Image (cartoon, rainbow, N blue to C red):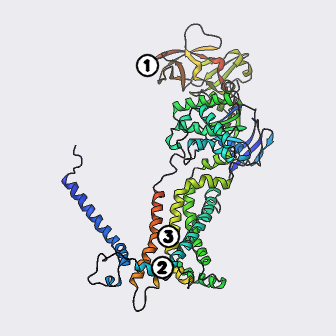
């Protein structure tokens, strides 16, 4: 068990500044997810924590001790790799025991821990098989098994589910979450998949161009993004960004779309905007904040009439493309809210949760 | 469905193919067959006109002579020289190859530079080497030949093993480093098992190179450490050739290569890295 502290960590690959001064504290027992688009430096940062890369600046502390100069094997960490990294010439049981044998653990203890891990992961029947005889999901379980028998201070996961098909990925995601509940070791998990990040994390650390864009609890990032990038990265389908101009009048404010039409903002949203009359902004509306209008409108909810263009049913929900403010936007409606292309639909937009972004700085202003 | 029967046209084509393949095989195997047969013949039978396809009886006196006169020591010398030099070349070469593959030692071009060393015509360097060996007293000894064959095999081993090592998924090594191995243990417990088929094939080639070398052995040996190819030339006389000895010695000298090739075949067909990563 250990906390992890990064202060001012930098990493260069030749001229590429991959990690640019990361300060991050991960509490003991926390499940932290490093997420971001490819090339954001998340894997590099993880590998630096593991000791597989040397930082070019800053300090890495695990369990209170600076580990910059320690080799990977001296850091008492366990790591699960994207491609499983199983030894093809060893059986499942030998693979799981590999790290324990390397550390000269007594055979009796090895056997005990291997069978415990096998039971926890449901791979007890495969112990004598070779990796090539297993499916992708089973291989990843073995890889996780190899990590948990180590009883390490810190678990690192480098995109462990990205080679699995969708259904298996959901299944393994659940298992990893359960695993964390059972063994409560500090975990750092790298992924580019925002669903994995949202569902697994105690805390999401969203990286962009080698820097932390924002960190916090999943819902905090989702509901109170600090930048347009964060708002756009989290959520599926992505948030709709519609160019508009602010129009303020005392305590009241509205957004005026460049193609005409305007939406009046609720007073809570309008208050900080008083001095910003005439500013160009991006109006961010999540697909989930559209709904089929019906009955009286709550405070801050406005009605909007649109024509359904593309209709994509998913079973439970139906994604419908509509025109708003001169751009295409996606509205996530109930399955049967809309049935045919070209249908006129009356929508309600919840502006209490709208995100207003300054297009120049990318920062969220309200 | 016509199972087991082919249309006449296809059958004819197939027959012609097999016939052609059979003729070529016979043509190539005939010298080997003839070599074996001569080694079992008596002198009378060897010079018999017309030639005898099969000796009257299988007798081993030609081999007996080689053992009695100590000529077979040449085979032993070859085994020692070729065996030790390929062993040393494999160990050193694999370590060099690891360094090139994983640490980028020497940058992009060092590997090419090393293999180009192997392309030097041996005849161009044999006399300079001879002079150096005379100076250091290395002529006509095991050490001199082993040193030379090791030096000649190293570039080949480095080049081949570098290719095999590059193909080992890096994650396997990183995982082992995290799990508690040091770099040497990683090489021994992860890289070595992964490249074993390549290692075996490469060792066979290095062994065969040293085994078959005639030029250096001829120049650098005298009486003490004569290798098998050089020994063979002693049987070609100005007046007459000792065909019986030549044949028997050649058979003995070919046997290790049979063993080597069968070993190589076993390892070449095995795709050991299957299932290492996503598959």
Q: Can residue A215 be seen in this view?
A: yes
Task: Point out the residue furthest to the left here.
Answer: B8
Confirm or deny contact between disc 1 and disc 2 (CB under 8 A).
no
Confirm or deny contact between disc 2 and disc 3 (CB under 8 A).
no
**Numbered disc 1: what chain?**
A
Report how far apart the C-alphas of labels 1 and 3 lie in the structure. Answer: 76 Å
The residue indicated by pointer 3 is: B208
Foreground residue among A62 and A60: A62
Foreground residue among B275 and B139: B139
Report how far apart the C-alphas of labels 1 and 2 lie in the structure. Answer: 97 Å
Find numbered disc 3 in the image and state the secondary structure of the residue it sits on. Answer: helix
The residue indicated by pointer 2 is: B67
Q: Is residue A197 above or below residue B14?
A: above
Q: Are marks 1 and 2 on the same chain?
A: no
Residue A303: assigned label:
none
The residue indicated by pointer 1 is: A340
Report how far apart the C-alphas of labels 2 and 3 lie in the structure. Answer: 23 Å
Viewer-nearest of discs 1 and 3: 3
Say few, some or many: other residues with alpha carbon within 10 Å of mark 3 (under 14 / 14 to 19 / 20 or more): some
At x 71% / y 36%, what residue is drawn?
A212
Q: Is residue B113 left or right of residue A73?
A: left
* Position in image of residue A117 (x %, y %): 62, 35
Q: In which quarter of the image is residue A231?
A: top right
Find numbered disc 2 in the image and state the secondary structure of the residue it sits on. Answer: helix
Q: In this view, does B89 lie above or below A135?
A: below
**Numbered disc 3: what chain?**
B
Q: In this view, does B181 lie above or below B120?
A: above
Task: Point out the residue furthest to the top here.
Answer: A295
Find numbered disc 1 in the image and state the secondary structure of the residue it sits on. Answer: loop
């Amino acid at each position: 068990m250990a906390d992890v502290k990064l202060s001012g960590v930098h990493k260069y690959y030749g001229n590429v500044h991959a990690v640019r001064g990361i300060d991050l504290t991960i509490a003991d027992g926390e499940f932290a997810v490093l997420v971001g688009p490819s090339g954001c430096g998340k894997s590099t940062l993880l590998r630096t924590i593991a000791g597989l890369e040397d930082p070019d600046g800053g300090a890495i502390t695990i369990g209170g001790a600076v580990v910059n100069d320690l080799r990977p094997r001296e850091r008492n960490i366990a790591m699960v790799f994207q491609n499983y990294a199983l030894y093809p010439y060893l059986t499942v049981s030998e693979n799981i025991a590999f790290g324990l044998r390397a550390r000269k653990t007594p055979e009796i203890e090895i056997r005990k821990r291997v069978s415990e891990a096998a039971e926890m992961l449901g791979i007890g029947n495969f112990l004598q098989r070779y990796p090539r005889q297993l499916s992708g999901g089973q291989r990843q379980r073995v890889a996780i098994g190899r990590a948990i028998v180590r009883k390490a201070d810190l678990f690192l996961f480098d995109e462990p589910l990205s080679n699995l098909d969708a259904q298996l990925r959901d299944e393994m995601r659940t298992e990893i979450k359960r695993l964390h509940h059972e063994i409560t070791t500090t975990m750092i998990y790298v992924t580019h998949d925002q669903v994995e990040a949202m569902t697994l994390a105690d805390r999401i650390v969203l990286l962009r161009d080698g820097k932390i864009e924002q960190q916090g609890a999943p819902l905090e990032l989702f509901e109170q993004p600090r930048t347009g990038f964060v708002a756009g990265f989290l959520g599926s389908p992505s948030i709709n960004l519609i160019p508009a101009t602010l129009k303020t009048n005392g305590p009241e404010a509205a957004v005026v779309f460049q193609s005409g039409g305007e939406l009046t903002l609720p007073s809570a949203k309008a208050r900080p905007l008083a001095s910003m009359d005439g500013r160009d902004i991006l109006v961010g509306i999540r697909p989930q904040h559209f709904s089929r209008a019906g009955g009286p409108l709550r405070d801050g909810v406005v009605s909007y009439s649109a024509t359904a263009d593309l209709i994509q049913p998913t079973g439970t929900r139906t994604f419908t493309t509509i025109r708003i403010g001169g751009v295409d936007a996606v509205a996530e409606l109930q399955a049967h809210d809309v049935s045919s292309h070209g249908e006129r639909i009356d929508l309600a937009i919840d502006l209490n949760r709208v995100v207003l972004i300054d297009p120049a700085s990318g920062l969220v202003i309200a | 469905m016509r199972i087991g029967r082919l249309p006449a046209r296809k059958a004819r084509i197939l027959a012609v193919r097999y016939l052609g393949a059979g003729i070529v095989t016979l043509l190539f195997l005939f010298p080997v067959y003839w070599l074996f047969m001569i080694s079992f013949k008596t002198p009378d039978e060897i010079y018999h006109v017309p030639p005898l396809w099969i000796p009257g009886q299988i007798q081993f006196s030609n081999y007996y002579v080689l053992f009695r006169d100590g000529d077979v020591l040449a085979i032993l010398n070859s085994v020692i020289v070729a065996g030790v030099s390929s062993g040393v070349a494999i160990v050193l070469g694999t370590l060099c190859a690891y360094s090139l593959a994983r640490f980028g030692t020497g940058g992009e071009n060092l590997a090419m530079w090393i293999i180009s060393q192997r392309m030097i015509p041996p005849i161009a360097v044999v006399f300079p080497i001879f002079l150096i060996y005379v100076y250091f007293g290395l002529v006509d000894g095991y050490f001199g030949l082993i040193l030379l064959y090791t030096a000649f095999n190293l570039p080949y081993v480095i080049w081949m093993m570098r290719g095999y090592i590059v193909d080992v998924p890096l994650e396997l090594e990183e995982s082992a480093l995290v799990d508690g191995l040091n770099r040497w243990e990683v090489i021994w417990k992860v890289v070595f098992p992964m490249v074993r088929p390549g290692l075996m094939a490469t060792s066979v080639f290095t062994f065969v190179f040293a085994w078959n070398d005639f030029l250096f052995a001829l120049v650098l040996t005298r009486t003490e450490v004569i290798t098998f190819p050089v020994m063979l030339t002693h049987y070609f006389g100005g007046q007459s050739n000792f065909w019986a000895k030549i044949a028997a010695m050649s058979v003995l000298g070919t046997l290790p290569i049979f063993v080597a090739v069968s070993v190589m075949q076993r390892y070449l067909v095995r795709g050991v890295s299957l299932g290492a990563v996503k598959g």
